[in-house]
Amino acid sequence: MFVSDFRKEFYEVVQSQRVLLFVASDVDALCACKILQALFQCDHVQYTLVPVSGWQELETAFLEHKEQFRYFILINCGSNVDLLDILQPDEEAVFFVCDTHRPVNVVNVYSDTQIRLLIKQDDDLEVPAYEDIFRDEEEDEEHSGNEGDEGSEPSEKRTRLEEEIAAQTLKRRQRREWEARRRDVLFDYEQYEYHGTSAAMVMFDLAWLMSKDLSDMLWWAIVGLTDQWVQDKITQVKYVTDVGVLQRHVSRHSHRREDEAHALSVDCARISFEYDLRLALYQHWSLHDSLCNTCYTAARLQLWSLHGQKRLQEFLADVGLPLKQVKQKFQSMDVSLKENLREMIEESANKFGMKDMRVQTFSVHFGFKHKFLASDVVFATMSLMESPEHGSGTDSFTQALDSLSRGNLDKLYHGLELAKRQLRATQQTIASCLCTNLVVSQGPFLYCALMEGTPDVALFSKPASLSLLSRHLLKSFVCSTKNRRCKLLPLVMAAPLSAEQGTVTMVGIPPETDSSDRKNFFGRAFEKAAEGTNSRALHNHFDLSASWRRSPQQQPPPPISDLRPEVVLAGWQDTPASPGWGLQGGAAWLPHAQAVIELKAEDRSKFLDALVTLLS
């Protein structure tokens, strides 16, 4: 059920208990975790933190700890599946779920005892009514005759029996009609996946309600929202709306800081709202490197070609920036050039077709020396979490979590260096794919596969990094191709996961269109293609409710949306999908979502053939 009063129904309940935190491996979840940790530290709440990267780890961790805890908190995992069916907990276990994945599973919504959803009600959830989904099972009494009325005439008994048969037939027809409506309602509700309000923002709202919101908590909420924007998890409209909410909190904290200026230390966090350049890490890099390795500018200028490099020189000349200045560190550039740099770049960018060169964002100053944009922290934290240099996922999670603390700026700067390497590798890989024509049309979608031995291929073995590469590659391909049809196609990308085990990771990305309501159903298509070909696949990521697995000894029930005989798998068009479409129909794409699946390399060919057949 949804929690209406977060303070009374959630925080005051766990405040005097030992709780177990399951935190997903994404930047927004880390930020929400930091806010909750700060609250727990204020009130001396005992907790155990367990990072989880997929359903398999969540099940294993729950089995290990379920005897020691009664209260469990799940951050960015668990809302979009029947959690009780997956974990099989004891009746006294209570789960508090703060998750951005949508739609929320209807069983979780209407579970009154064990599932408590920490989700904002203004997210346009459109949950079906209880009576449309659930119905009390009542055994209809079968009356074969009235035994106490043995003296009745045979004609009377026959009439009474005919009436009972007619009543039972009517009840069965009504039952079938209700089940048909139920399938339609659930199909409409669960067919598309998307993301809701940032988990970090939800946790910050809790801290604000309790008057315990600190500047660090506000900054973590900003980073959590920016992570959703960087990874295209929310629409631009949603991002701008949430930025406005956080901007009001920033103004409130700024006034409070002015009133208490005498009590603040010199290394306090000072947050400000800005319209800044859409250039990755440019304040910690050279302007030239940032222009070359930011997806937006690299795609618009087509920097993988000689013509694109020439356009870059023309762009810098139009701005009026000497090459010697832009190739040194941004902090070392002449002050006279940096004074009006943003306005100058924006004016020239409009001439070169880059009309969205500046975006609404936030920055933070730690003392007088350290300044970071929210996107800088997102890239740094993401790179730390997915860096192959750390031995285990837990170590990477810990490093990324620590980098969000003000006292660990050395780890944050290390993350920035890893992010630079990741961005360089991304653009080099995109240039290689486009120049060697690795992006090919499979009919209903584009396909690109990174081979074992490709430079820096290990950097793209994790889902978030591969998804980022896929989105950037698709944007660059759309800017470079002259084929109108290819510009409307989605992209499926594969990268080696483990050479020893012979596995690959595959990601599905929706078409790159100007509309804000892009929709994606690759998750369902991946699942059906794997099932139809008996491919050895693992749906282990929290991204899609269709992509999940159970322990080997337990068989999952069919997803609720699969109850409909005609299941829409994938496709694209401008109008919403109709529940009546079958496999040959087109379905709308989900806003800014991606599907992820892991499978054996030798099964890839038959998996792709099945996928082409499904989507044709």
Image: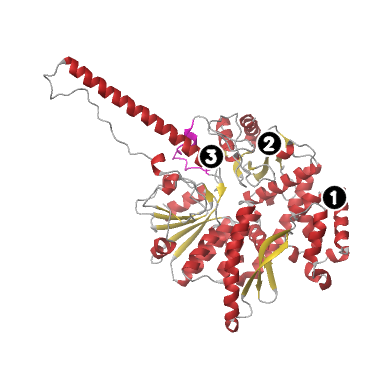
Q: Which residue is mark 1?
A: 308
* Residue 390 in sight: no
Above-or-below relation of 249 to 526: below
Question: Depth-wise, is mark 2 or mark 3 nearer the camera?
Answer: 3
Q: Amino acid at mark 1?
A: Gly
Q: Position of residue 436 (x, y in %)?
A: 80, 41
Residue at the far bottom: name it: 262
Q: Which residue is mark 2?
A: 445
In depth, the one of 292 and 72 nearer the eye is 292
- Secondary structure, mark 1, is helix
* Residue 183 in sight: yes
Label 3 crowding class (10 Å Cα cut-off): few <14, some 14-19, many 20+? many
Q: Residue at x 28, y 22 (%)?
A: 165
- Residue 191's disc is 3
- Secondary structure, mark 3, is loop
Q: Position of residue 531 (x, y in %)?
A: 55, 33
Q: CA distance from mark 1 to mark 2?
A: 27 Å
